[in-house]
Amino acid sequence: MCTQVDPEIFYPVSLDPISSGVLAARRVCTGCPVLAECRADVMAHEDPARRWGITAGLTPVERRTLFAASRDSSPRSGAVAA
């Protein structure tokens, strides 16, 4: 569980999804009992300008992609076509 490891593991030098640092961080997240809640929390509250490190087993690029996909699939309200 992430609370029992050095937090530096979540800030690897290389954020390549198959780098040893990213894989080490993901091993911590694998099987975590609160992974879904962690991922939902980061997607709801993360500042897009501050996407660093591995959170909920995802790199900043993966979180940006997931965030964009969730925005594209959510219903939009407000503006009405004229």
Image (cartoon, grey):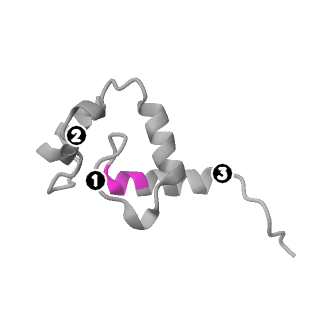
- Helix, strand or loop at label 2? It is helix
Give the amino acid at mark 1: Gly
On the image, the x and y values in percent for residue 8 come to: 18, 47
Q: Who is closer to the viewer here, 62 or 43?
A: 43
Q: Who is closer to the viewer here, 28 or 19?
A: 28
N-term-proximal mark, 2 vs 1: 2
Residue for point 24% across, 30% down:
4
Number of the label disc, if any, that sits on residue 25:
2
Number of the label disc, if any, that sits on residue 74:
3
Label 1, label 3: how far apart the Cα atoms are: 26 Å
Dominant secondary structure of the residues highlighted in magenta in the image: helix
Would residue 69 be found to the left or right of residue 15 on screen? right
Q: Which segment did they paint magenta? A: 59-63
56 above or below 70? above
33 above or below 65? above
Using a 10 Å C-alpha cutoff, classify the residue at mark 3 as few (fewer than 14 neighbours), some (14 to 19) or many (20 or more).
few
Using a 10 Å C-alpha cutoff, classify the residue at mark 2 as few (fewer than 14 neighbours), some (14 to 19) or many (20 or more).
many
User: CB under 8 Å between callouts 1 and 3?
Assistant: no
Label 2, label 3: how far apart the Cα atoms are: 30 Å
Number of the label disc, if any, that sits on residue 4:
none
65 above or below 30? below
User: CB under 8 Å between callouts 2 and 1?
Assistant: yes
